Image (tube, rainbow, N blue to C red):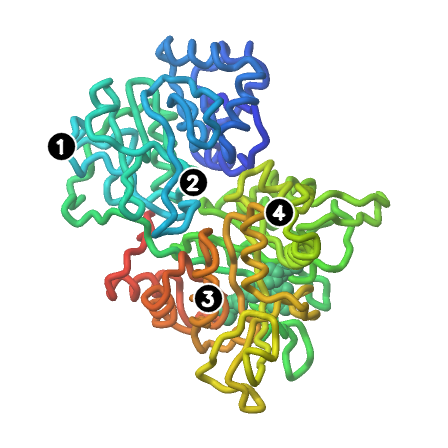
Amino acid sequence: MPTVHLLDYAAGNIRSLVNAIEKLGWQVEWVTSPEDVSKAEKLILPGVGHFGHCLTQFSNAGYVEPVKAHIQAGRPFMGICVGLQALFEGSAESPAVPGLGVAKGYLERFKNEDKSVPHIGWNSANSQSKDRHSSGQSVYGLRPDSKYYYVHSYAVPYREGELEKDGWSVATARYGSEEFVGAVARENVLATQFHPEKSGAAGLRVLKAFLEGKQSQALPPDISLSATQEGLTRRIIACLDVRANDQGDLVVTKGDQYDVREKSDNAVRNLGKPVQKAQQYYEQGADEVTFLNITSFRDTPLKDMPMLEVLRQTAATTFVPLTIGGGIRDTFDPETNRTVPALEVATLYFKSGADKVSIGSDAVTAAEQYYASDRKLTGKTAIETISEAYGAQAVVVSVDPRRVYVARPEATTHHTLKTSTPGPQGEMYYWYACTIKGGRETRDLDVIQLVTAVEAMGAGEILLNCIDKDGTNSGFDLELVKSVKAAVKIPVIASSGAGNADHFAEVFQRTNVDAALGAGMFHRGEWTVKQVKEALSKKGLMIRRFEE
Ligand code: 1PR
């Protein structure tokens, strides 16, 4: 098997990259010291998270000169995400830390007045849209009609001609009104701001072109450049609630308002096997797959955590982002009689192939403590420690709110909304109370308090469930989505209630939500992800089409 060297210099969830390389028939050898760099024929510099953190580790470990020498010697080099950023001169994320300066440019933070930051989702890397010298040719397999998975808050703004005059081919993406560098290539160097290993077939094609040294190829003749749409697509997520049934088998289940037991015989509803289901949704074009271990509040020995194996198997064949939730907290391990910090638990998941972890109950407890201590950040919560080590984009907070009706807004100190569907006693107002342990316990904390607290702690995204809507097939709770979107700048995923494609269209058209998630309608086979996307596309909403 041919070999590619991967530079291992900072904590990062790079299992997916190894999986993608292996899928393409290459094997990975690790560069673990500066001396190893000279042994590498082809070198990949991955990187996730914080520019300053990554570059400082990289520089302190003595990699700057060997990597520059590798590039100058004309040997193949690929940078991914922060690996692209490292090639530039510096970043507003850490002004005191220099980049390698191989390419001219400086990273700036996306403006969040009119859009969510981080930029998360599928966007273009188009080198064809302008009169650039690569026209008609695909640079390292990049295609103007493909979409690639991005997750970052900082980017190199695109200024026409600047990089090109130094011989770079540039592929760009547009987020709101900002055009930025999605990928650059020059001779032996390719760097992508997006994650090719998480970008389905389109991303694997780019990785393959790098590994095989195919810098430039003719674009397929059937590509219509005029039909190419720029911008972030509408993200559709398939969610799998997973738990052991009474026979001890791990199954995909789905509740009605969080009750997953059948009315007839009280058995746990069994809708299939987690790994197969995830693979199926990947093939239908799901933009992300989320697993929620819904009985994680029970203590299990860490080594037996069943979701680790589910993740390992899924990540080997499913090249879109994977999120894992359930039990991400400081955990008592009955086998070793020790409390394992949340960061260590998350690390186990990242090493098994997760790209993001989702935190539920622990986020509520942390938010309560945040308000009790007058909004003081301790740096010790699961959200803060994981966000610090892996970057905000790797930390999702899953919210499980339930409606509490009140006659008048003055009846509570919480943020109330006026309802169009009165409560059981005819109440015209309600607030959303946060719950923990899968809705088993309701807390005196409202959803707006929770999301603003976790944003301050460094969460990168909100997965917004709604117990009242879960499993009802009656559409997303638009009032809830709107109120949470108005409260935070980080992306929000609408969840609970999807029953058909129109519900997805409705939440995208009537709110400015960033992504939408479905579960039951997909599990029961009533709709495929592909059908939902086709329906959205017919309504003029931009989606990522699945590539073989
Ligand atoms: O608290 O950090 O250990 O995480 C536990 C996780 O498990 C949380 O993310 C919590 O949302 C989830 N969870 C716990 N119990 C249940 C349950 O259903 N009994 N599932 C549960 C939450 C909600 C959604 C669902 C959507 C869409 N599931 O993820 O998939 O509501 O469903 P639909 O499209 O069919 O309406 P911790």
Q: Residues within 10 Å of mark 4 (few under 14, many from 20)?
A: many
Front label number (1 vs 2): 2
Residue placed under numbered mark 4 in the picture: 383
Residue at 64 percent across and 82 percent down: it is 263
Quick check: 335 left or right of 85? right
Q: Is residue 292 left or right of residue 380?
A: left
Instruction: Label 1: state its secondary structure.
Output: loop
Nearest to N terminus: mark 3 or mark 1:
1
> Which residue is more in the foreground, 217 or 72?
72
Marks 3/1: CA distance? 43 Å
Measured in 3D between alpha carbons, the distance from the residue under mark 4 to the one under mark 3, in whole angstroms, is: 22 Å
Locate residue 121 relative to residue 261 in the image: left or right: left
- Amino acid type at circle 2 is Ser
- Which residue does the image show at 46% across and 57% down from the upper left? 492
State yes or no: Cβ of the residue under disc 3 lies below 8 Å from any atom of ligand 1.
Answer: no
Q: Residue 153 carries which label?
A: 2
Residue 411: percent from left, percent from top: 61, 79
Instruction: Name the outermost residue toward the right.
Output: 337
Dividing the picture into quarters, in which one does residue 270 lie? Answer: bottom right
Residue 210: % across, % down: 36, 26
Q: Name the residue under label 3.
A: 483
